Image (cartoon, helix red, strand yellow):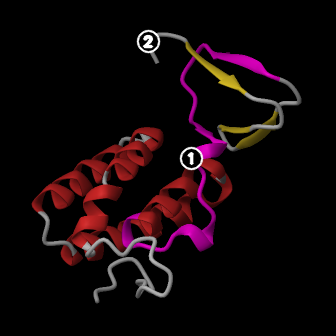
């Protein structure tokens, strides 16, 4: 990190920094003055929210950041899942981005990888026929699953 980064948090908001969960009791601004891996609470998804292939990938990568003790297992799951995921999409833009995400994870740029995955959600929604949030719509059972 070449510059410091200031993050403003609301009362009772959480931030995950290098695997630690921090909750603030009042509005605060935190200044990160060196390289850290962090994730804002608003960017954390729960397992039951990992309802599409890219959201499942996001969840796997998120574990690397939130749970350093489980990072090796999550990294292995990422390595097994990514080729299946790339093969499941025909969209060249998604496939290209997934290769960049692989590079980011390999270089331990986890936050950037998560940000890149989130940016693909609209493309994924289009590729899956736009049924991402439709109740009763078919959901993939695992990363790489095809309809």
Q: Residue at x 71, y 16 (%)?
A: 29
- Would you say the residues marked 1 and 2 are in contact, meaning their CB atoms lie under 8 Å apart? no
Instruction: Relative to 90, say whether 104 is above or below.
Output: above
| Camera-nearest residue between 71 and 17 | 17
Instruction: Relative to 19, say whether 32 is above or below.
Output: above
| Camera-nearest residue between 67 and 91 | 91
Residue 106 visible somewhere in the drawing: no
Secondary structure of the residue carrying numbered label 1: helix
- Tell me where residue 95 sits by quadrant: bottom left
Q: Which residue is mark 1?
A: 43
Q: Which residue is mark 2?
A: 2
Q: Is residue 23 left or right of residue 124?
A: right
Q: Is residue 49 a member of the stretch shown in magenta?
A: yes
Q: Position of residue 138 (x, y in %)?
A: 41, 88
Q: Position of residue 43 (x, y in %)?
A: 56, 46
Q: CA distance from mark 1 to mark 2?
A: 23 Å
Residue lying furthest top in this view?
3
Q: Is residue 104 left or right of residue 45?
A: left
Q: Residue at x 13, y 72 (%)?
A: 90
Residue 126 visible somewhere in the drawing: yes
Secondary structure of the residue carrying numbered label 2: loop
Instruction: Relative to 60, say whether 39 is above or below.
Output: above
Q: Which residues are magenta?
A: 27-54
| Camera-nearest residue between 89 and 12 | 12
Residue lying furthest right in this view?
25
Quarter of the picture holding the C terminus = bottom left
Q: Residues within 10 Å of mark 2 (few under 14, many from 20)?
A: few
Q: Is residue 121 left or right of residue 39?
A: left
Q: Residues within 10 Å of mark 1 (few under 14, many from 20)?
A: few
| Camera-nearest residue between 109 and 55 | 55
Q: Position of residue 129 (x, y in %)?
A: 26, 75
* Sequence-first tag of 1 and 2: 2
């Amino acid at each position: 990190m070449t510059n410091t980064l200031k993050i403003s948090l609301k009362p009772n908001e959480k931030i995950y920094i290098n695997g630690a969960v921090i909750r603030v009791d009042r509005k605060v601004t935190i200044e990160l003055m060196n390289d850290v891996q962090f994730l804002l609470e608003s960017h954390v998804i729960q397992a039951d929210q990992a309802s599409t292939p890219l959201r499942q990938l996001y969840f796997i990568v998120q574990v690397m950041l939130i749970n350093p003790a489980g990072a090796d297992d999550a990294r292995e799951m990422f390595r097994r899942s990514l080729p299946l995921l790339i093969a499941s999409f025909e969209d060249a833009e998604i496939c290209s981005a997934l290769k960049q995400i692989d590079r980011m994870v390999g270089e331990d740029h986890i936050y950037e990888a998560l940000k890149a995955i989130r940016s693909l959600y609209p493309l994924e929604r289009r590729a899956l026929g736009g049924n991402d949030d439709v109740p009763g719509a078919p959901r993939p059972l695992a990363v790489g699953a095809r309809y």
